[in-house]
Amino acid sequence: MPNYDGDFEQTRLSMLAEQHRDIVGSKGEVIFCADDENRLCGTSWTLEDEIFDQISGSGFKVQLMELLDSFLVYRAECEQCPRNEGIVRIGNGGLTIEWLPDGSTHLSS
């Protein structure tokens, strides 16, 4: 089992935010969850501004979803909890992540 790096996720989110400064200037959140194989299986996007087309067209949406999938796999490999559900908050020029206990989101099955 690899040692968990507490900065791994935020470092990568900051790098993504740097690439998409125009998007992280808007407010929103992405709720996400994992399946039984620790892979991304669902997201729910809430955006304050009308930037959804920009998020999709710029590649931000795909890039964030790929990052979330890698975070889920990484946490499972390191046996780091919580690891199945969370929220990425968009705004104030950056991205932050909050991991939630299982069953905390409307995406829970």
Image (cartoon, rainbow, N blue to C red):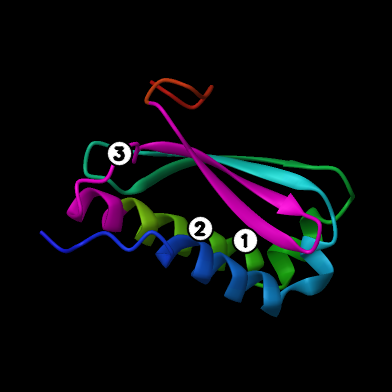
Q: Quadrant of the N terminus?
A: bottom left
Q: At label 2, which amino acid type do we have? A: Met
**Marker disc for residue 20:** none
Part of the protein shown in magenta: 73-101
Q: Nearer the viewer, mark 2 or mark 3?
A: 3
Residue at image position (65%, 67%) is: 60
Q: Is 41 left or right of 22, judged from the image as shown?
A: left
Q: Are marks 2 and 3 in contact (CB under 8 Å)?
A: no
Q: Is residue 25 left or right of residue 1?
A: right
Residue drawn 20% across the image and 62% down it: 3
Q: Residue furthest bottom?
A: 19
Residue 3 lies in the magenta-colored region: no
Residue at mark 1: 61
Q: Could you tell me which residue is drawn at 30 percent across and 39 percent down?
A: 81
Q: Write down the residue under mark 2.
A: 65
Distance, label 1 to label 3, CA atoms, is: 25 Å
* Image position, residue 22 (x, y; %): 84, 70
> Quadrant of the rendered structure where residue 80 is?
top left
Find the residue positioned furthest to the left.
Answer: 1
Of 75 and 58, which appears nearest the observer? 75
Task: For mark 2, give the secondary structure.
Answer: helix
84 in magenta: yes
Task: Say which label, 1 or 3, has the lower sequence index.
Answer: 1
> Of the residues under marks 2 and 3, which one precedes in the sequence?
2
Residue 87 lies in what quarter of the image?
top right
Q: Which residue is mark 3?
A: 81
